[in-house]
Amino acid sequence: MINEEFDAIVIGAGMSGNAAAYTMASDGLKVLQLERGEYPGSKNVQGAIMYANMLEKIIPDFRDDAPLERHLVEQRLWVMDESSHTGIHYRSEDFNEVKPNRYTIIRAQFDKWFSRRVREAGATVLCETTVTELVRDDKGKVIGVGTDRAGGAIYADVVVLAEGVCGLLGTRGGLRKMLTPEAVALAVKEMHFLPEEVIEQRFGVKGSEGCVIEAVGTISHGMAGLGFLYTNKESISLGIGCLVSDFTAKMESPYALLDALKNHPSIRPLIAGSEVKEYAAHLIPEGGYKAIPQLFGDGWVVVGDAAQLNNAIHREGSNLAMTSGRIAAEAIIQVKKRHDPMTKRNLALYKTMLDESFVVKDLRKYKDMPALLHNNAGNFFTTYPRLMSEAAQNFMRVDGTPKIEKEKATTAAFIKARSRLGLVSDAIRLALAWR
Amino acid sequence: MTNPVTNLRVEDKLYQNRYLVDSGRPHIRVRPHEQPSANLLALTRVCPAKCYELNDKGQVEITADGCMECGTCRILCETSGEIEWNYPRGGFGVLFKFG
């Protein structure tokens, strides 16, 4: 079907694949991008918050025509128990700037836009095409791909695996190990539609201002997990995710968890009267620095979620995906300009460049956090949230109890739940993992 | 104000979604078994589309039509060989309008 040979084949049209394809095509490389969905974005799921800085480095004028929902002026971090939330809210007029820093987006729409830019940059984008195998030469170098379309293999100097979190080709091709249930979260999400003015009233925003809520606590039923609520222009993305290993051990259903979140007294009024138009599920790599697989080899590089480049602590994924896609593309461009072959030795440049970027530096900073949260889910996601709620309520409720007794009761509750040693050790372990 | 969207069954949730089902070519298969392993049994609860269900004989069966292709079941049961997991053919499967 396709007899031409390409400089690069990019597998997948998500954030990392689009960034890689755009960067290479803009530099004049002959790029073929293959996407299994009917249109780019049709298989992609994200919260979604998009960070402007990382996209600016790829498409500086993206604000001119990208489908952006709201720019964020307020972030609420909540700790919830069954009937309450305790929160830190940060809102600043400084976020109302000419070039805002963070936007909510709707991925299916955003990815269509990004893909149009990729095509305008000169890449060939072929949808409805599932790549079924990597084609190798007799020395094992990846030289192309086989697809489920008739017509045989398609060849290229290098293959960019931007295949997403499942990463069938890489795991089946022996390029990296299968994800383990402890290193991946399952998130479910619903799109709740409401009139624009209702969203503005409920969240105290105007125009294109937006607000996000991220929450931990008893909403994850003792599992390591996070709930989120993001405001879009005319909809609210509401979801919750927990580690697959925890879901399995507890035999919990993600949709039951989501329904419980929707019925929580702190969330329910925010979505009241909405019309749900979609229910989505997706995996999120949570293994962090220690889970990063081999990133390059003879004739291939891997980027984005497929490379498990996700910062679970800061809930950043698509910016790491975009940046890894761009950096892989820049490395390939450099190798190409030197007229060198796309060997493992030469493509190591990608890892060298990525190590120097925020992507790997951030993941290295939090390298011990995934294990800490996974091994102490009961304490961090249930015990402490309940204690915080009790302490706050005790502090605020005026009932004739002398303040000194109230304080003693709060201290006693913490010690009873975790013991003095437990409290100190939790604090130290958290501080060490954060450092 | 009552909220009409809570307590929906997962079947009703999936009804909101768009799918192009590849009839007769399911992309996930469960290996015939006498008794399911713990992980395979867990899928009856953990699969976000509730594709996995127990039959009368206590075996796990799959109807993949509502699958959102998240890959959770693959993580849990592919290595042991209990399920066979592939992407649907190009263009088929779930089609997210919003994602």
Image: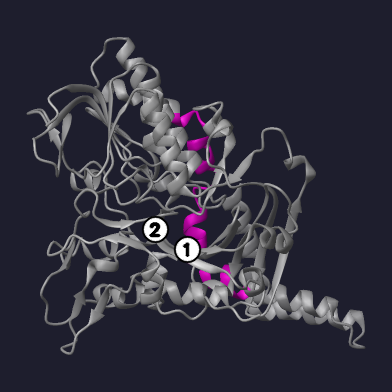
Instruction: Tell me, yes or no, if residue A328 can be seen here.
Output: no
Q: Can you tell which mark lies on residue A282? A: 2
Q: Quadrant of residue A86?
A: bottom right
Amino acid marked by disc 2 = His
**Numbered disc 1: secondary structure:** strand
Q: CA distance from mark 1 to mark 2?
A: 9 Å
Callout 1 environment at 10 Å: few (<14), some (14 to 19), or many (20+)? many
Question: Magenta stretch?
Answer: A354-383
**Numbered disc 2: secondary structure:** strand
Quarter of the image with the N terminus of chain A is top left
Q: Can you tell which mark lies on residue A189? A: 1
Q: Chain of mark 2?
A: A
Q: Chain of mark 1?
A: A
Q: Quadrant of residue A51?
A: top right
The numbered mark, 1 or 2, whose residue comes first in the sequence reads 1
**In this rendering, position of residue A97 left or right of residue A354:** right
Instruction: Tell me, yes or no, if residue A249 can be seen here.
Output: yes
From the viewer's perspective, is residue A377 above or below residue B98?
A: below
The residue positioned 43% from the left and 73% from the top of the image is A255
Do tag 1 and tag 2 residues touch (Cβ < 8 Å)? yes
Residue A19 within the magenta-colored segment of the rendering: no
**In this rendering, position of residue A21 left or right of residue A271:** left
Amino acid marked by disc 1 = Lys
From the viewer's perspective, is residue A322 above or below residue B75?
A: above
Q: Can you tell which mark lies on residue A245? A: none
